[in-house]
Image (cartoon, rainbow, N blue to C red):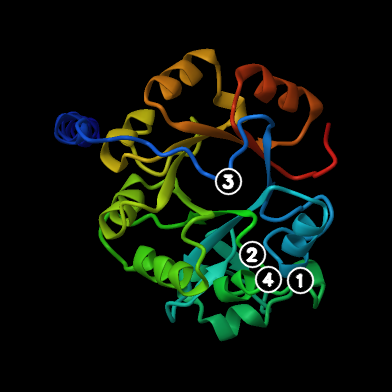
Amino acid sequence: MFGVEILLLTILIITVTIYKKNWVPVYPPLYSTEKLVKVGHRGVPSLAHENTLDSFRKAIDTGMDGIELDVQFSADKKLVVYHNWSIETQSGKSELIKNLTYSEIHKISLNGNEQNEIPLFTDVLDILNKNIIINIEIKSAHLLNTNIEKNVLKLIYAYGFENNCILSSFNPFTLRRVKKINPQILTALLWRKTDPQFILNSPLWVWLCRPDAFHADIEHLDENLMNWIHRKKMSVLTFTVKTSSELSKAKHLGVDGIIMDDPYLN
């Protein structure tokens, strides 16, 4: 295992050398420099079940600046809006989303409420508009290409949301593929100290994916990390702000925006 970590570190150092040049992060045009940007975490889970159409509608109705959502592939390559890798099926078994077809997923009612259906990415895009920030987390644990990035971008183009979306991921290889397909699309690397997606868990993955933004867990964000991010000229969102003390911390650190559960938190 130690040998794998050394190999990954060597790859990262080589990548830094190769990609250090010509990386100029772009500040999201819909961000405000005068006020804290507020993005609804999977909608507004304080008012409606996360990642449901009702939750996203409420985020818009309560005046949030944007919404954050998760997309991943089903077994039949449908883009499903759901956060967890697995779900409890009607039979009571826990199954990975990637192993279920969307017709099977669609039958599942979250929390036993028939209105809490798991939507497709297109279902959510249908109710959004170009005036709000759409933060799309691409969930993929693959190092190699599965075409999920290509499929997400295809729908973004179809809806004309190129200028108000940000594609984020904990997977730097996913973001690198997004930038190779379209360098103009804004991207953000998601990062936290706990539950790493890969053995080597470091903010230095930015040198591989060259994102425009860095989205960090509020628990692990501090002044040193903020200074490092700002030296790289990336914008900063922090997640998930749930308490008044976390909101105060975010403001003190000078982040550009927060991803939050409750639109009325102050």
The mark that comes first in sequence, 4 or 3, is 3
Residue 96 seen in the figure = no
When the figure is inspected, residue 23 is found, relative to residue 77, above or below; the finding is: above
Q: Which structural element holds mark 2?
A: loop
Looking at the figure, which quarter contains the C terminus? top right
Give percent across and percent down for residue 9: 22, 30
Number of labels in the image equals: 4
- Foreground: disc 4 or disc 1: 4
Q: Earlier in the sequence, mark 1 or mark 2?
A: 1
Q: Earlier in the sequence, mark 1 or mark 3?
A: 3
Q: Secondary structure at mark 3?
A: loop
**Depth-wise, is mark 1 or mark 3 nearer the camera?**
3
Which mark is first along the chain, 1 or 4? Answer: 1
Q: Which mark is residue 127?
A: 4
Amino acid on which the number 1 mark rests in the picture? Asn
Q: Residue at x 71, y 74 (%)?
A: 117
